[in-house]
Amino acid sequence: MSIDSITFNDKGYLTKNIQSQFASRIHEIMQSSQDSSEESWTYIYKNSLEQKDLSFLTPANEIEKSFKSCFADFCDNKFSFFFRRLSNEVKENVASSEASIIAYNFCNSEEFKELIANLTGRRIGKTDLFYINRFDKGHFLNTHTDSGNNVGVALNITQNWDPNFGGLTHILDQDRKKVVDTLTPGFAELFLFDTSEKQVPHFVSMVTANQKSRRMSVIARYGKA
């Protein structure tokens, strides 16, 4: 086993910058995501009552109401989130997105899956979850672990992110009381996490200001080959 795979299987997660291998393809995903129309980005949220995707055409007062319910749960330390996403799924009143197609094909390419296999020491199968997320001002994802049967990835496609504005991924200890690692969004930073054998509690801190370069990541979970 490689040093990377030993680290992954010991800690349950690993970070690696893969710009040297895939710079042009990741830049294409980033640019295409930035160019995607607002109509193709949904608002996905979860509170203590429901999880739902809202289209961009949803009335503003309904979106605001959904955000406030999520934020109330956030303040009560209940699992909740609110952010934007691009999906390759067909949804009513949601425009199609070239970015999601490009990113999905990249995530399922043999070159990328081989890289994940080498970094984790796992056999990598098909994606069983995929989307591109975007955290705007006020968006957050509080403490959770990701369930699955193999490996999950978050590939950052953000350039020049200022950590003063939040959007950081914080890894917690198993008691969820102490931050043991912090990952700052950076172009082509790959965060790999175990979804089957170890639990890795983590959260994305609330974004406090909008920047020209949006805080975006490609999210995928893989089954076993």
Image (cartoon, rainbow, N blue to C red):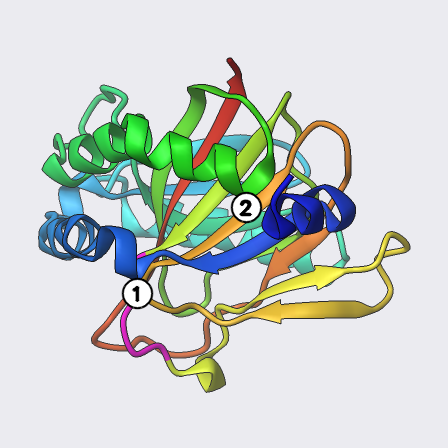
Q: Is residue 69 left or right of residue 174?
A: left
Please tell me which residue lies in front, 147 or 112: 112
Badge 2 local density, few (<14 within 10 Å), some, or many (20+)?
Answer: many
Count of numbered tags = 2
Q: Is residue 213 left or right of residue 218?
A: left
User: Hey, what amino acid is under mark 1?
Assistant: Thr
Q: In x, y percent, where is residue 98? A: 10, 36
Please tell me which residue lies in front, 30 or 83: 30
Residue 214, quarter of the rendered image: bottom left
Residue 2, quarter of the rendered image: top right
Image quadrant holding the N terminus, namely top right
Q: In x, y percent, where is residue 80? A: 62, 47
Tell me if residue 172 comes above or below residue 29 in the rendering: below
Q: Residue at x 12, y 56 (%)?
A: 31
- Residue 87 in the magenta stretch? The answer is no
Residue 220, quarter of the rendered image: top left
Helix, strand or loop: magenta stretch: loop
Question: What stretch of residues is rendered in magenta?
Answer: 157-161
Q: Which residue is mark 1?
A: 158
Badge 1 local density, few (<14 within 10 Å), some, or many (20+)?
Answer: many
Q: Which residue is mark 2?
A: 192
